[in-house]
Amino acid sequence: MGVSIGELAVQFGCELRGDPGVVVERVATLAAADERSVAFLANPRYRRELIGTRAGAVVLAAEAAAACPGAALVCGNPHATYARIAAVLHPLPAGPAGIHPSAVVSPQARVDPSAHVGALSVIGADATVGARAFIGPQCLIGECAVVGEDVRLVGRVTLCRGVEVGARTVIQPGAVIGGDGFGFAQEQGRWIKVPQIGTVRVGCDVEIGANTTVDRGAIEDTVIEEGVKLDNLIQIGHNVRVGAHSALAACVGVSGSTSIGQRCMIGGQVGIGGHLTISDDVMITGCTMVSHSISSPGVYSGGIPFEDASTWRRLVGRFKRLESFAARLKALERRPGGPPDQEEDDD
Amino acid sequence: MGVSIGELAVQFGCELRGDPGVVVERVATLAAADERSVAFLANPRYRRELIGTRAGAVVLAAEAAAACPGAALVCGNPHATYARIAAVLHPLPAGPAGIHPSAVVSPQARVDPSAHVGALSVIGADATVGARAFIGPQCLIGECAVVGEDVRLVGRVTLCRGVEVGARTVIQPGAVIGGDGFGFAQEQGRWIKVPQIGTVRVGCDVEIGANTTVDRGAIEDTVIEEGVKLDNLIQIGHNVRVGAHSALAACVGVSGSTSIGQRCMIGGQVGIGGHLTISDDVMITGCTMVSHSISSPGVYSGGIPFEDASTWRRLVGRFKRLESFAARLKALERRPGGPPDQEEDDD
Amino acid sequence: MGVSIGELAVQFGCELRGDPGVVVERVATLAAADERSVAFLANPRYRRELIGTRAGAVVLAAEAAAACPGAALVCGNPHATYARIAAVLHPLPAGPAGIHPSAVVSPQARVDPSAHVGALSVIGADATVGARAFIGPQCLIGECAVVGEDVRLVGRVTLCRGVEVGARTVIQPGAVIGGDGFGFAQEQGRWIKVPQIGTVRVGCDVEIGANTTVDRGAIEDTVIEEGVKLDNLIQIGHNVRVGAHSALAACVGVSGSTSIGQRCMIGGQVGIGGHLTISDDVMITGCTMVSHSISSPGVYSGGIPFEDASTWRRLVGRFKRLESFAARLKALERRPGGPPDQEEDDD
């Protein structure tokens, strides 16, 4: 499927430098592109590859255009424009409207006739599937769940009873939305299960990654607001709220009842404790332990870069003797010569 | 479905302060409750909300009862009593007895006639499903697996060949019990797979969270004892034993052949090395690395709270220079004035 | 199924000390073995158990043979030889050739007649399944995916569109290969999805654990080279390359575009940042944060062993005051007596 770069320039508001009649069929990296490919330059790191590219056209910013050896699609945000062009050149496979004969759909479910329901999917009683939704193979949609318009469940997605998913949201395989939260009352050394009565409300334009889990609320609901992006293997505990347009990288864990603000960016393997509040516009770098609330926008960190094992062992040994360091420092300060004025901070 | 609070008081051994004829239909938070709702107060933090609640009744301890504006169900353990009342008011959907016509059940499987087997589940040869078990949709029960009475596999649960699950255990979607352990022999820079001959034995009254994985034993079995609670996305390696009534929060990893005692509480993202022994009654706070055995009950920690990124960078810089700190401290101690007596601890 | 230890000795090149006519039927630990069992000794830690074993034969190295109370199968690599013997005595259940009637296989798929396709699996258009492949129940094989000869998908494995899996590779339940990478362009505080055009190429003799996720490439492919072993709940980001014969323990996260060399060993819960290069023959111990590239073989660490909670709190307090320590040290060095020569390293 070919598109002329002139059409692309018009459709996406780019300034075209080059022949509008050039036809492209696919996207490619600068290094691998041929004359039928569109490439893009967003990261200056790849500038060297721009010079040698054979791409039919390159999407880039004005300041890089002079270095482009071929046609250029000049725009303010090359990454976003590239994303849109790639979606045109590589459309996702659309399933035919209708329900695959092997799917098991409750007669009490309401599936829009324009929706696609794939092979061996299960849709429970009183569930609703909106217009043009794509329910891939082997999905499990529980009773009373609500799937919005143009939602895409890639395949083997689980939406438990009552879960709501907003329009255009994409969920990758293996994700489980609405499993029971981890709620137990202690009684004489045993755990009594606390019924998890709430559900999960997922907003519009959300993406949820493979094998990510979002627990249903204990009493009220767990909420993933619009535009949130969750990577793979993330755990969202019960009654968490993730604010609009926040992005969480893979392997993050968020404990119950924590509220994350809007437009936050959380790095991989970050662990966030329960009952905390993270303000809007917070960035947390990877592997950080978040054990208290964050009330101001900003960047926060808690991971220590590695060393070779023997250096690391020595550092850990020193760390474990910090108490003794402190005592020795104090002893030195007490020697004749007078205590330095920082001493009071140390006890 | 309404129940009078008089009946609830009798059934759960509460002292009732208020009109026994009040009928409640659901549970709710103190703040959101109306006159048809039961709320509870277990955490003193929510005491302010008690004063303003409009709940039909509140489950609480004697010392809080005076502050309750309406009817009170007074008991020794409000959280546990609330859990039991919530289970009465919000019963889990029970599937009808019998096997859904779309399920694929081996003629060599033995499924109790009172059990429910949901749509598109698979049950292998010589597997056993006990009385009143609920096998949700799309579950996979391997050959020779044993599912006890009143077990609840919510849906899309995998029990591999030979796995045994005790009575009343609940398993959330996506959990995989009995995948192969990670066992390989090294030979000339390559890995030879070591067959994983053991299985997994899960006790009674266990809960296993969404997308959690419990590996089968290499030769002998992996064991999850009765009453254990595993949250989501936990990894339990082969031949691990988790002692009765221990609770592990999400994203914990336990390496092979480690034994965790009874009544332990393990925080989120804790990593526990292989071949270790953790005593009974150990609590480990979140994000801790457990690299050696723990022989005494107690609380153990290993995570460092975050800072804003620039403060953190400076701290990490200081940490990486601890060797130099130590040398400078020693040099100071050697100056005239005499070494302090702690010096010997530092070499 | 019994085999004489004489046959085993011949088949696997062991020196037999004992009666070649002894027949064994199964493997067992040294402690639990009876006369119909083969045990092995690879770790000297278990030497005490060797002395008391009642095993029909023990696989061990020459230097341990004298201590063996019964028959010995002496070889250079007892663990690898044991692995091969265990595979003979405990063969994996082989499915019958052919497609289960409940599976949904596209007429455009090419499934070798010797392959097994289990109950309720789905195979998309233009997918290929090689000779003797075992596709367990409830697997999902997307369009254009390629499954090599003798591959074993244990059950409920997802291979998304176009994913390629090399011969003899084993994938455990719940793994998702080829979900979309986490690629979004930012535009005015919102995220635009970047289509993930690449796929995943998994080499021969790979093992992928339960609920592990390997994302498809953004433009080019994500690559898992031959002989790689991935444990459970691992995240491999888009465009990562994992070099041949590397082994990654559970809960590891590898961010996008990182390249890991050959024969690396990565411990549990290690987090590896994006766009990094890890050299061949690198070992990284558990819980390490890898935030920059590693250019030399060796062992690297970054985790701090835990303490009891009160000791840990004090250590963290000292750590958080390292800035003040540094200032006090400098003040002491400035006292009469002359600065030590390390001082310049500290500002």
Image (cartoon, coloured by chain):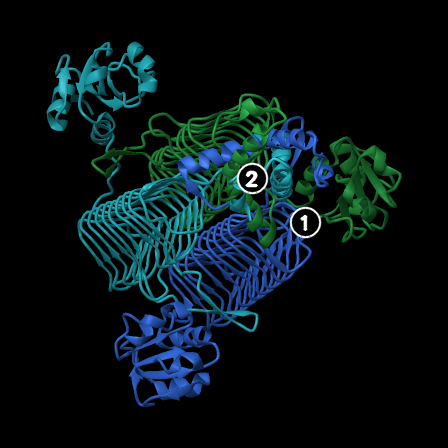
Chain colours: A green, B cyan, C blue
- If the image is split into quadrants, where does the N terminus of chain C sit? bottom left
State the residue in front, B89 or C310.
C310
Specify whether C125 is left or right of B198: right
Specify whether B36 is left or right of A28: left
The residue positioned 62% from the left and 61% from the top of the image is C243
Measured as percent of width and height from the top left, residue C343 is found at 71, 37
Residue furthest out toward the left: B10
Q: Amino acid at mark 1?
A: Ile
Name which quarter of the figure residue A70 lies in. top right
State the residue in front, A160 or C312.
C312
Q: Is residue A95 visible?
A: no
- Choose mark 2 or mark 1, whichever is in front: 2
Measured as percent of width and height from the top left, residue A133 is found at 50, 37
How busy is the neighbourhood of tag 2: few (under 14 within 10 Å), some, or many (20 plus)?
many
Against C243, residue B205 (above or below) is above
The residue where tag 2 is placed is A249
The residue where tag 1 is placed is C219
Against B282, residue C53 (above or below) is below
Specify whether C170 is left or right of C338: left
Q: Amino acid at mark 2?
A: Ala
The residue positioned 18% from the left and 19% from the top of the image is B73
In which chain is the residue bearing label 1?
C
Measured as percent of width and height from the top left, residue A168 is found at 54, 34
Q: Is residue C109 visible?
A: yes
- If the image is split into quadrants, where does the C terminus of chain C sit? top right
Specify whether B166 is left or right of B335: left
Name which quarter of the figure residue C331 lies in. top right
Measured as percent of width and height from the top left, residue B48 is found at 33, 13
Structural distance between the alpha carbons of marks 2 and 1: 20 Å
